[in-house]
């Protein structure tokens, strides 16, 4: 009988955890989609890499939502059993709660192993691939040819180019160029134009033919008009960002061998996520107990609050560890010890005192 009930408990926890994790993952993907689209518009990403960036970005945060999904799944599943008096009936029939909780803890250990694999091995590779794709996409979008019928910005938005059409020889037809140089504005109209990049990739060269240029300051009448047969407009390419290695892309093996405080702090943060899965599950089991006439979702807010405090303590501990405010020997173990101690004092100690008082009576 305990085995059957244990499987029943485990099924309830797994289904609820998957549902909560799926909802959180959908919200995460939606948020990631908005961020990628905003960056794609800014840096003119090609369409081919958008879905890759979205998938890699979502993959990096799966290990973060799994602990909270497991916590809420246990609280909601066991809370329903307490609310529907199923747990009370099982205990009244002589079933020990410990036998029912063992499969849940085993499932938490399995999830912790998956989170450890994601955090320690897969996430650094996915993050490095994301930054590599961003650089390639930004460079490809920056040096892509000007498409007729579309406005195109260069130099971080200081130069705007528009071509009405394209000629058979590959040049652009009826071209409009606007450049902002401080308070002065330059507007150029040309019949034809060519767009090319310099050999070193640092400049974009727009060559205009048969046109006129208007120069002046907005709001002032002293505009200058010039006619030309050929004009070259060099535009410095917008910088794509530094190439410095980020901690998120460093492999866990390199972090383990390093003595740098920042890298050691990153390693301790990666190790903390799978430990958090087990600690939160053990915490969720007594947290899900409901008193008579309590609502089914009355403990959800407390579970969310505990998760935010726990995760913020880990994030703060990572910063303190990287700055040398905490000894490396302590790592982030003190955060887990503090949560477990609070669990013992708040959950187990009052119950033990009540049992001792009942025995004395």
Image (tube, rainbow, N blue to C red):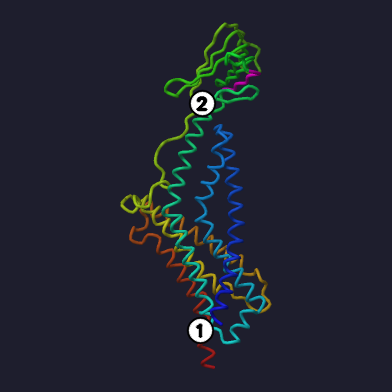
Residue located 51% across and 93% down the image: 360
Tell me the quadrant of the picture where the C terminus can be found. Answer: bottom right
Assess whether residue 163 is covered by the magenta stretch: yes
Up/down of 285 relative to 238, above or below: below
Q: Which mark is residue 11?
A: none
Q: Quadrant of residue 216?
A: top right
Assess whether residue 51 is covered by the magenta stretch: no
Label 2: state its secondary structure: loop
* Tally of numbered discs: 2
Residue 32: horizontal and vertical position, in percent? 57, 46
| Main SS category, magenta section | strand
Residue located 54% across and 14% down the image: 207
Residue at mark 1: 353
Residue located 60% across and 72% down the image: 78
- Give whichever of 279, 260 is nearer the camera: 279
- Give whichever of 253, 11 is nearer the camera: 11
Q: Is residue 335 left or right of residue 5?
A: left
Region in magenta: 159-165
Residue 246: horizontal and vertical position, in percent? 41, 44
Q: Quadrant of residue 89?
A: bottom right
Badge 1: residue crowd in 10 Å (few <14, some 14–19, many ≥20): few
Q: Quadrant of residue 272?
A: bottom left
Of label 2 and label 1, which has the lower sequence position?
2
Badge 2: residue crowd in 10 Å (few <14, some 14–19, many ≥20): some
Up/down of 35 relative to 75, above or below: above
Residue 170: horizontal and vertical position, in percent? 57, 16
Residue located 54% across and 90% down the image: 358
Residue at mark 2: 143
Marks 2,1: beta carbons within 8 A: no
Residue 7: horizontal and vertical position, in percent? 56, 74
- Give whichever of 334, 65 is nearer the camera: 65
Label 1: state its secondary structure: helix
């Amino acid at each position: 009988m305990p085995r059957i009930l244990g499987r029943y408990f485990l099924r309830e926890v797994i289904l609820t955890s998957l549902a909560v994790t799926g909802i959180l993952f959908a919200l995460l993907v939606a948020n990631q989609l908005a961020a990628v689209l905003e960056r794609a518009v800014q840096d003119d990403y090609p369409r081919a890499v958008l879905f890759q960036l979205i998938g890699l970005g979502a993959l990096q945060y799966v290990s973060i939502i799994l602990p909270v999904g497991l916590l809420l799944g246990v609280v909601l599943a066991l809370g329903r059993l307490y609310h529907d008096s199923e747990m009370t009936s099982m205990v009244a029939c002589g079933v020990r709660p410990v036998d029912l909780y063992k499969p849940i803890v085993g499932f938490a250990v399995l999830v912790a192993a998956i989170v450890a694999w994601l955090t320690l091995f897969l996430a650094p590779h996915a993050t490095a691939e994301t930054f590599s794709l961003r650089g390639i996409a930004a460079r490809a979008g920056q040096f892509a040819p000007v498409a007729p019928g579309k406005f195109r910005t260069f130099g971080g938005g200081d130069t705007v180019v528009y071509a009405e059409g394209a000629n058979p020889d590959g040049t652009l037809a009826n071209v409009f160029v606007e450049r902002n140089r401080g308070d002065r504005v330059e507007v150029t109209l040309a019949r034809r134009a060519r767009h090319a990049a310099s050999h070193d990739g640092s400049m974009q060269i727009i060559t205009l033919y048969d046109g006129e240029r208007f120069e002046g300051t907005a709001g002032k009448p002293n505009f200058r008009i010039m006619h030309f047969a050929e004009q070259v407009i060099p535009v410095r390419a917008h910088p794509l960002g530094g190439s410095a290695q980020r901690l998120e892309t460093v492999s866990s093996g390199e972090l383990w061998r390093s003595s740098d405080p920042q890298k050691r702090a990153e390693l301790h943060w990666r190790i903390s996520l799978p430990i958090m899965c087990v600690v939160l599950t053990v915490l969720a089991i007594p947290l899900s107990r409901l008193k008579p006439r309590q609502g089914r979702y009355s403990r959800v807010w407390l579970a969310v609050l505990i998760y935010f405090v726990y995760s913020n303590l880990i994030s703060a501990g990572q910063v303190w560890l990287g700055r040398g405010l905490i000894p490396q020997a302590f790592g982030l173990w003190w955060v887990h010890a503090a949560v477990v101690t609070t669990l013992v004092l708040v959950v187990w100690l009052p119950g033990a005192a009540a049992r001792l008082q009942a025995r004395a009576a």
